[in-house]
Image (cartoon, rainbow, N blue to C red):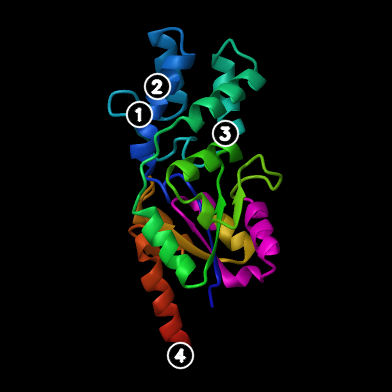
Amino acid sequence: MITAIIFDKDGTLFDFTASWGAWTRGFLDVVATSDGLRADLARVLGYDLLTQTFGKTSPVIAKTTPEIADILAPHLDMDIVALNAVMNQQAAKAKMQPAVDLRQVLGGLRARGIRLGLATNDTEVPARRHLTDAGVLDLFDFIAGCDSGWGGKPAPGQLLAFAAHLGIDPAQAAMVGDSTHDLFAARAAGMSAVAVLTGVADHTELQPHADIVLSDIGGIADWLDQISRENDI
């Protein structure tokens, strides 16, 4: 039985393109000193300035904030520490767009006795800000950013720390995410792997690595009911 669920943030709790598409354009306007530089930065990020969307191989989708900074740094006259600071400051201001009614869906899971966690390749301070702004921070038992001490995905450190924090076997937990990085982390941790389609990856890409693919996290309750029925047979 699943007694705990750890969620990815971007593309899972929050619609990826709706949340980060416009933000990325604004961020590039902050750090780029010319139109040419802005175009170069967009290219290395796999980002379309006109449509404000990301290609499927964009590093923004799954890499950690420091990894993205490392990609941008060679193109900027800014040291890596300063660049990371700017990225974190700007990320905390991002206007996140929930993929569903988060209070209703996550509150419903809590009402079932499910413990909740967050594992994001974003840093922890912006992640907490986004959950606070969405009015759901209090529903989480555990929050891990890439800088919280357990690394980032696809490594399983954040997920195993969640299970240890709750004192449960990882097999009792599920990881829910929108990218293969999330699903690989779930497998490495020994957790169920649940994919959602509120990120950039499509069903064909995610299905081979997932126990189930849902349109969004609103389908988790039905999935839990399905598991319960199967266990009763």
- Residue 72 among magenta residues: no
**Circle 4 Cα neighbour tier, 10 Å, few/some/many (<14 / 14–19 / ≥20):** few
Residue displayed at 64% across by 55% down: 156
Element under disc 3: helix
Q: Residue furthest top?
A: 34
Residue hosting label 4: 232
Residue 87 spot, x, y in % from top left? 54, 26
Amino acid on which the number 1 mark rests in the picture: Ala
Closer to the eye: label 2 or 3: 2
**Residue at image location 59% in from the left, 37% down from the top:** 125
Q: Earlier in the sequence, mark 3 or mark 4?
A: 3
Q: CA distance from mark 3 to mark 1?
A: 17 Å
Please name the residue shown 60% across and 26% down the image: 70
Disc on the earlier residue, 3 or 1: 1
- Foreground: 8 or 95? 95
Tell whether label 1 touches label 2 (CB within 8 Å): yes
User: With 95 as the anchor, is 51 left or right in this view?
Assistant: left
Identify which amino acid the numbered label 3 is placed on.
Thr
Q: According to the image, label 3 marks what residue?
A: 65
Which residue ends up furthest to the bottom in the rendered image?
233
Give the class, few, some or many, for how many residues have Cα within 10 Å of label 2's Cα (few <14, many ≥20). Answer: few
Sooner in the amino-acid sequence: mark 2 or mark 4? 2
- Describe residue 175's horizontal placement relative to residue 98 as left or right: right
Disc 2 designates what residue? 26
Q: Which residues make up the magenta segment?
A: 155-183
How far apart are the two marked residues, 2 and 4, measured between alpha carbons?
52 Å
* Of residues 193 and 146, the one drawn nearer to the viewer in this rendering: 146
The residue indicated by pointer 1 is: 22
